[in-house]
Image (cartoon, rainbow, N blue to C red):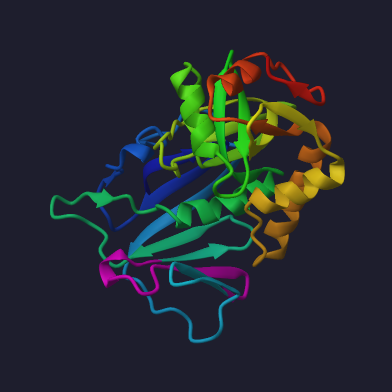
C-alpha cells in the first residue's frame, strides 16, 4: 500500500492508502482545506483507510442500524460493514469494512477513477462523518450539530435543533467580522489539557467550512426571542440538551460509551448556557462582550 493523502478533521486523521488506484483529489471547495498529500501536525486519533475497487453487495441479514436509504451498518465478527447509497446508482455507492477498534478500514467504490486516472473524493460524506464518530469517541470528543464563531482567537459554539438559529447567528456574526469555521457541524475535544473546537467539511446553508481548531470558550444553546438574554442551565438540563445535538453512534457500544463519557466531562468542564436572541445587531453586541458565561444577562 502507498499513501495517497490525508483527510484531517480537527484532531482526526484518515490516512488514505492504495495499491490499485491513482492519485486522489477533492474538488469540492468544502474539502479544500481538509485534504492534503501529507497532513501537517499530530492527530489525536488516526484511521488507515485502504482504497480498493469493487463494491460487494450488502449483507442479507438485518442491519444494526439503518438511516433510511442513505446508509446502513451490519456487524461481522470484529468488523462493522457500512454501505452508503443503498438505492443510489451503482457508481455512487460505497462500502467500507471497519475494525470495531478503528485500527483498519477498507473502502470500496464502484467507480474508483476518472478518465484522467484521478480518484475523486473516495472518502466522503456521510461515511467520513460516521467514522469520525468512532474516532472522536476514542479521545472523549464528539460531533455537535452546531456552528462555531471565533473572536479574539477563541471559539464559541452555537447549537440547537434544526431551526434554532445556527445559520442566523452565523450570518450576523460573520457580517460583524467574526470568523465562522462551520455553520452546521463541529467537533469538540480535549488537546493539551484544554477543550477545543474545530470546523468540519460538513457545512450548512452558509457554506462555511474552514479546517482550523481553536480553544473552546463556551457553548450556547440557541433560542430565538424578541429580546437578548442569557439563561443558566442545570447540569441535568445540559446533559439532556447535549444528547439532542450530539452524534451518538448507538449501533456500536464502545463508540457510544466513549461519546457519552466525553459529553459528561464536557458538561462539567465547559461553560454552557442558553442564549435567547433576536435577529438584530443586539445579539452580536451581547456576544462580543462575553468573555465567559456568568449566569443571566441582558442586552443593552
* Residue drawn where x is 51% and y is 51% of the image: 129
* Residue drawn where x is 45% and y is 56% of the image: 126
Residue 169 pos. (x, y %):
54, 31
For residue 152, which quarter of the picture?
A: top right
Q: Looking at the image, which is closer to me, 141 or 184?
A: 184
Residue 186 seen anywhere in this rendered image of the structure: yes
Residue at the front extreme?
226
* Residue drawn where x is 57% and y is 17% of the image: 151
When the figure is inspected, residue 134 is found, relative to residue 149, above or below; the finding is below
**Which residues are drawn in magenta?**
75-94
Question: Disc count in the image?
Answer: 0
Residue 42 seen anywhere in this rendered image of the structure: no
Relative placement, left or right, of 243 versus 33 is right
Relative placement, left or right, of 53 versus 233 is left
When the figure is inspected, residue 140 is found, relative to residue 171, above or below; the finding is below
Residue at the left extreme?
115
Q: Looking at the image, which is closer to me, 85 or 139?
A: 85
Quadrant where the C terminus is found in the figure:
top right
The answer to whether residue 91 is magenta is yes
When the figure is inspected, residue 86 is found, relative to residue 41, above or below; the finding is below
When the figure is inspected, residue 172 is found, relative to residue 22, above or below; the finding is above
Residue 93 pos. (x, y %):
34, 67
Residue 185 pos. (x, y %):
53, 43
Amino acid at each position: 500500500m502507498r499513501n495517497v493523502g490525508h483527510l484531517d478533521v480537527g484532531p482526526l486523521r484518515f490516512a488514505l492508502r492504495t495499491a490499485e488506484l491513482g492519485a486522489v483529489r477533492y474538488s469540492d471547495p468544502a474539502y479544500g482545506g481538509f485534504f492534503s498529500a501529507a497532513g501537517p501536525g499530530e492527530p489525536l486519533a488516526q484511521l488507515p483507510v485502504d482504497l480498493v475497487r469493487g463494491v460487494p453487495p450488502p449483507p442479507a441479514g438485518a442491519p444494526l442500524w439503518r438511516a433510511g436509504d442513505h446508509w446502513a451498518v451490519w456487524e461481522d465478527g470484529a468488523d462493522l460493514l457500512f454501505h452508503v447509497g443503498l438505492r443510489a446508482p451503482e457508481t455512487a455507492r460505497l462500502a467500507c469494512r471497519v475494525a470495531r477498534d478503528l485500527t483498519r478500514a477498507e473502502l470500496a467504490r464502484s467507480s474508483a477513477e476518472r478518465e484522467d486516472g484521478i480518484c475523486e473524493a473516495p472518502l466522503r460524506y456521510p461515511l467520513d462523518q460516521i467514522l469520525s464518530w468512532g474516532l472522536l469517541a476514542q479521545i472523549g470528543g464528539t460531533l455537535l450539530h452546531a456552528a462555531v464563531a471565533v473572536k479574539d482567537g477563541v471559539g464559541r459554539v452555537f447549537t440547537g435543533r434544526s431551526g434554532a438559529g445556527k445559520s442566523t447567528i452565523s450570518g450576523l456574526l460573520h457580517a460583524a467580522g467574526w470568523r465562522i469555521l462551520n455553520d452546521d457541524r463541529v467537533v469538540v475535544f480535549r488537546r493539551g489539557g484544554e477543550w477545543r473546537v474545530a470546523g468540519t467539511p460538513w457545512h450548512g446553508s452558509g457554506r462555511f467550512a474552514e479546517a482550523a481548531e481553536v480553544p473552546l470558550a463556551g457553548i450556547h444553546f440557541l433560542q430565538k426571542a424578541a429580546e437578548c438574554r442569557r439563561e443558566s442551565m442545570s447540569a441535568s438540563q445540559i446533559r439532556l440538551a447535549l444528547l439532542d445535538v450530539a452524534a451518538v453512534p448507538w449501533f456500536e457500544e464502545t463508540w457510544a460509551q466513549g461519546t457519552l463519557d466525553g459529553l459528561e466531562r464536557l458538561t462539567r468542564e465547559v461553560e454552557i448556557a442558553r442564549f435567547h436572541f433576536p435577529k438584530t445587531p443586539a445579539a452580536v453586541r451581547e456576544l462580543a462582550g462575553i468573555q465567559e458565561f456568568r449566569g443571566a444577562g441582558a442586552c443593552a
